[in-house]
Amino acid sequence: MKALEKFCDDISKYYAEKHEFYSWYVLLCVLNAMLALSATFGNIIIICALTKTTCALCTSKILLRGLAFTDLGVGLVVQPLYISVIAEILLKDSFSSNDSECNTKIAFLVLGTFLTSASFFIVSAISFDRFLAITLHLRYREIVTERKVTITISVLWALSAVTSVGYLLIGDINREVVSIAFTITFLVTTTITFAKIHLAVRRHRSQISAQERKV
């Protein structure tokens, strides 16, 4: 119990007192409500479209569906939890966290970390999948199968769950370091992958142009 209280005290510093940012908090609630609705309905439409679509690269559809479910979770769960956290801050009389607010903050942080990590992992997997599709050519369907992609999605979700629990247990300073390191690693790896995709596409175009000139 003391550990949870200390954790709530650690994360409470990220929320300013309501009398300083009352209007800003209200605006955040309105914006998150609108974004939650758009994320929910938008991703439901995407999931339905992917379910009805028959495509040659079903492995890519599995990855996109996994990303859509992750984003749907953000709209259905994480953003409403954030609105609840802000609403409790606006409605309470003191700045100290009560049990209800503490539980809401913990749920928001754990589920937010879980779904954000899953989203980052799946986006990285999608970029790597596109790179393999371009570089492997006909061997792509032999190497990248639906079973392997499904297992990969499951592993990424499990890794995200471990990340969210670990994020809850580590210290406050370490939590900030991990967040920065994780974000930088994601941006660097994804940028490198898309850069390689761009170079591979340019190389293929050059080869096609050279063959056309010979003809």
Image: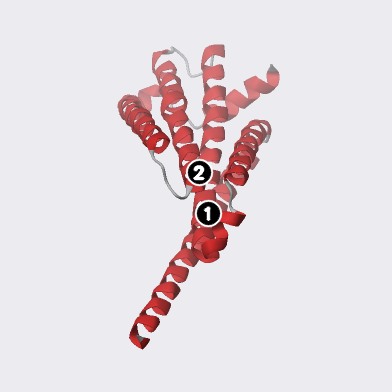
Nearer to the camera, 24 or 160: 160
Callout 1: few (<14), some (14-19), or many (20+) C-alpha neighbours within 10 Å?
some
Q: Amino acid at mark 2?
A: Leu
Residue at point 51% right, 60% down?
131
* x and y percentages locating residue 100 in the rendered image: 53, 13
Residue at point 38% right, 33% down?
43
**Residues marked 2 and 1 touching at CB (< 8 Å):** yes
Return the disc, 2 or 1, that comes first in the chain's sequence. 2
Nearer to the camera, 209 or 112: 209
Q: Give the structural element (helix, strand or loop) at label 2.
A: helix
In the picture, the quarter occupied by the N terminus is: top right
Q: Give the structural element (helix, strand or loop) at label 1.
A: helix
- The image quarter containing residue 103 is top right
Q: Is residue 181 above or below residue 42?
A: below
Nearer to the camera, 57 or 195: 57
In the picture, the quarter occupied by the C terminus is: bottom left
Whether residue 82 sits left or right of residue 121 in the image: it is left
Q: Is residue 159 above or below residue 90?
A: below
Find residue 129 and name its label. 1
Find residue 137 and name its label. none
Q: Is residue 152 above or below residue 35?
A: below
- Reading the image, the residue beneath label 2 is 63
Residue at point 54% right, 53% down?
184
Q: Is residue 13 above or below residue 98?
A: below
* x and y percentages locating residue 82 in the rendered image: 44, 25
Q: Amino acid at mark 1?
A: Asp
Whether residue 120 sits left or right of residue 32 in the image: it is right
Applied colour scheme: secondary structure
